[in-house]
Amino acid sequence: MEEHASDYDRGRGVLVRSARECPDPHARRYSILLLSREKDPDLLPLFVAGMKDEDKGVREQAARALAEMGEPATAALLDLIRDKEWRVRYRSAEALGLMGYSPGDAALIEALHDPKDHVRYMAAKSLGLIGDPLALEPLIGRLEDENEFVRRIAAVSLAKIGLPRARSAVAMAMEKEKNPEVREAMALALAGFTLSGPELDDENTD
């Protein structure tokens, strides 16, 4: 047993060093993936550091690792969603949505007013995944966002919440919407179809 534990510790140590130091982003990402399966709170600092990695794939995997960890990662995510770097805020909003953890709703609702449109987009998307009716009015406000992707995802999330007020707000926004692609997305959302196509991610900088 002691020999087995020693082998395990050595293997884990290799993965931790790879996640921290390997120059290959694919190796860093895969190391985080493997370590995330343990759901060990002791790995929380490693995953938090991964959220600030220069590589998009590593940030994405770190966000998923934190989401899979669940409640022990909540405090860290609520701190990260206010980070000065918008890419970190974006991935934090994503993780809270994947976690489906309603105590994160207040932070996501606040993030709907983030100065970076990408963050507003992911906050709206995550609120739709969680489906909390408390997000209803804040999401309705994003139907008039300056960014067309934010307007689209706000409509999708409102349709997922499914309350009559949400559906009527999307229908009214669709009547006023001038962008034909956004109108189509709103119509599809009301009809219950899953949207496909380009999204705002943390590699786009426009």
Image: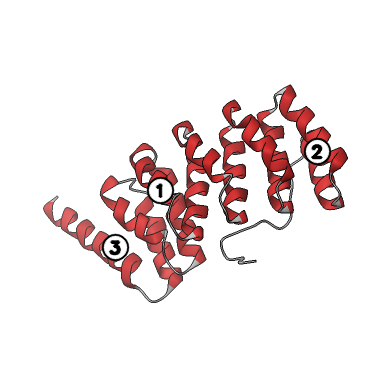
Which amino acid type is marked by label 1? Leu
Which amino acid type is marked by label 2? Ala
Residue 131, relative to residue 12: is it above or below?
above
Earlier-in-chain disc, 1 versus 2:
1
Judging by the rendered image, the residue that carries numbered circle 2 is 173
Determine whether the residue tagged by mark 1 lies in a helix, strand or loop.
helix
Task: Report if residue 191 is visible in the image.
Answer: no
Judging by the rendered image, the residue that carries numbered circle 3 is 16
Residue 123's disc number: none
Q: Residue furthest bottom?
A: 23
Determine whether the residue tagged by mark 3 lies in a helix, strand or loop.
helix
- The residue nearer to you, when weighing 102 against 106, is 106
Whole-percent x, y for residue 145 in the image? 70, 47
Determine whether the residue tagged by mark 2 lies in a helix, strand or loop.
helix
Earlier-in-chain disc, 2 versus 3:
3
Judging by the rendered image, the residue that carries numbered circle 1 is 66
